[in-house]
Image: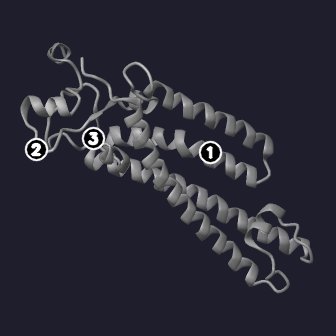
């Protein structure tokens, strides 16, 4: 059987990808706060209020009519929810696109890892680098929901004032995150996303290596020769 990728290597690859997601989230926060700020600058008497003050006030702004305040609040809430939704969609698009086209995200590329079908023999070089649409979609969706999706939903509920539902969703998000991560730390090192998509993570071939050297550099085939012969 082939040797599974080390925990440290996979963790570093995940950190690189998550740092990219955090960078996207930061840009979306800036854009969202700017959109909310534009709402305030267009209303006389509210120009001194910040976007964050509007979000946390739930529309109860000092010196503003209640109806106007609530209207602004709902517009601000919509902007925040759109930002959170955009974060989830962009994260999925990144995961899906990278895996479908090359079988690796930025983090996996930097750490020389590749995702492939669990029951496919390893083929070094450019062959079978792309993961394929169905598997990429499943793995990308599970990874996105586990890493970002549930947390984004919890934040949306919290900002909207649904504190109990937000707490439940937050607990679910933590449980789902670890349900996806823990299987990647033990045994065959296949995350929940890998198991549902029928994929596995292995080291990519060493540049310029061929034949047996390429197999060693990649961490071996996806399955043992005996198992491959029985399919």
Which residue lies at the image location 84% right of the left edge and 71% below the top edge?
69
* Residue 99, quarter of picture: top left
Closer to viewer: mark 3 or mark 2: 2
Asked whether residue 222 appears in the rendered view, the answer is: yes
Q: Position of residue 37 (x, y in %)?
A: 70, 76
Q: Nearer the viewer, residue 219 or 125?
A: 219
Q: Position of residue 175 (x, y in %)?
A: 61, 30
Q: Position of residue 32 (x, y in %)?
A: 63, 68
Residue with the mark numbered 2: 208
Whether residue 193 sits left or right of residue 2 in the image: it is right
Q: Quadrant of the C terminus?
A: top left
How far apart are the alpha carbons under marks 3 and 2? 22 Å
Which residue lies at the image location 17% right of the left edge and 40% below the top edge?
206
Q: Earlier in the sequence, mark 3 or mark 2?
A: 3
Residue with the mark numbered 1: 151
Which residue lies at the image location 43% right of the left edge and 48% below the top edge?
17
**Is 15 rendered above or below residue 74?**
above
Residue with the mark numbered 3: 131
**Is 152 rendered above or below residue 134?**
below
Q: Are marks 2 and 1 in contact (CB under 8 Å)?
A: no
Whether residue 150 sits left or right of residue 107 in the image: it is right
């Amino acid at each position: 059987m082939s040797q599974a990728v080390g925990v440290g290597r996979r963790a570093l690859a995940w950190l690189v990808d998550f740092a990219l997601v955090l960078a996207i989230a930061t840009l979306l926060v800036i854009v969202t706060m700017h959109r909310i700020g534009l709402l305030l600058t267009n209303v006389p008497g509210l120009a001194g209020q910040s976007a964050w003050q509007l979000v946390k006030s739930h529309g109860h702004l000092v010196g503003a009519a209640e109806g106007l305040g609530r209207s602004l609040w709902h517009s601000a809430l919509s902007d925040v929810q759109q930002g959170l939704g955009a974060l989830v969609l962009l994260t999925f698009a990144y995961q899906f696109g990278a895996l479908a086209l090359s079988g690796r995200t930025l983090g996996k590329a930097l750490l020389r890892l590749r995702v492939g079908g669990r029951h496919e023999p390893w083929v070094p070089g450019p062959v079978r680098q792309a993961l394929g649409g169905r598997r990429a979609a499943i793995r990308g969706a599970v990874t996105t929901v586990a890493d970002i999706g549930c947390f984004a939903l919890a934040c949306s509920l919290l900002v909207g004032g649904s504190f109990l539902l937000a707490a439940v969703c937050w607990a679910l998000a933590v449980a789902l995150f670890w349900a996806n991560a823990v299987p990647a730390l033990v045994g065959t090192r296949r995350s929940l996303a890998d198991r549902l998509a029928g994929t596995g993570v292995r080291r990519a071939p060493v540049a310029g290596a061929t034949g047996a050297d390429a197999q060693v550099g990649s961490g071996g085939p996806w399955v043992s020769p005996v198992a491959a012969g029985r399919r």
